[in-house]
Image (cartoon, rainbow, N blue to C red):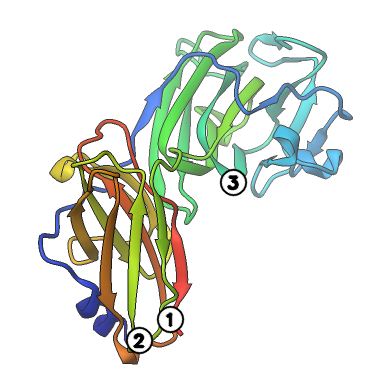
Amino acid sequence: MNKRALSIGLIAAGAFAFGAAAQITPIGPFTGDYSEGFEGQPQVLFEPCVSTTWGVGIFGDTADLCTPGNSGCHTTGSWGFFCSLGRRTGSWMYGSAGGFSQITFNDGAGAFGGYFGSNAYDVGEQPNATFTFYDVDGNVLGDEYVEFDRCVWEWFGWEFDVPVYTIDCVNGKYSGAFLMMEDLEYNVGGPSDCLTMTVDALFGGGSADWDVSGATPGAEVAIVYGFNPGSTVINGYAQYCASFGIDCVNQKRVICRKTADGNGEISCTKRIPGNAVGVRVLSQAAERGTCPDECISNLDDQTIQ
């Protein structure tokens, strides 16, 4: 398996530079693809995860809510400590009685929000919490510090340009515990594909075509590649905005850059080195000049035969 040889074989002239910072944008209340109000299920009494009691996860079993290393998950109608906070709607609200709360999404979130509050704080200080967001590989995408009034429900929500798979919800006191949640919302995934890419089967020693359609006629389209799934984010470099589902894309991993024809299509042909058999190759395309929006293709994932 020779990844260096494959890199040399696929590199095209005119590579561009990349950034790596994800964008986390605060947003107001919304109705998501999935909602969670902690209703219609048995009460959770100090369990490691909500699913321990329910038998399914939250958000219609598309996510789970746990207190890592603790048995702190608890649903109740009201909770008193320094002050008393009651449910916002329905019969139940959620809070952690031990440790911080962690939400894990099966398919990644493009947006998340809900109503949060706390009954535990330092005297003379505002209750506060920190939300830390992680990508599919567990890399930190960023965090958000918030403050709220005592025992009052307040909305906090965010939109992500890279799908978020894990959120740590940490109260400012008591090792992250006593952060209450109600009426949570989330949307699945990140930006929708606006380009369509097809790739020939890859054979060592042969040639393969990468064909992209759906681009704006006259726009530049770049096709990039890498060897592992993950996340590479470009925020305006060389007028590209893209969230690739490929780890460690860089200026040396560009298959080609071409101008789309009158039908919005490009085609690139590359020779595959004979000694690259067995190498996994992921590739994806992006259109230039769409910032701050993204126009990317589906992800192609093959192992060279």
User: Can you tell which quarter of the image residue 272 is in?
Assistant: bottom left
Query: Relative to 156, does residue 19 appear above or below in the rendering?
Result: below
- Disc 3 marks which residue? 107
89, 262: nearer the viewer:
262
| Dot 2 and dot 1 residues touching (CB under 8 Å) | yes
Q: CA distance from mark 3 to mark 1?
A: 27 Å
Residue placed at 34% from the left, 64% from the top? 210
Query: Relative to 170, does residue 243 appear above or below in the rendering?
Result: below
Structural crowding at the residue carrying mark 1, measured as other residues with C-alpha within 10 Å and reported as few (<14), some (14–19) or many (≥20): many
Q: CA distance from mark 3 to mark 2?
A: 31 Å
- Disc 1 marks which residue? 304
**In terms of sequence position, does the residue under pointer 2 or pointer 1 come before the other?**
2
- Disc 2 marks which residue? 276
* Secondary structure state at the residue bearing disc 3: strand
- Toward the left, the furthest residue is 14
Structural crowding at the residue carrying mark 3, measured as other residues with C-alpha within 10 Å and reported as few (<14), some (14–19) or many (≥20): some
| Dot 3 and dot 1 residues touching (CB under 8 Å) | no
Residue placed at 56% from the left, 9% from the top? 150
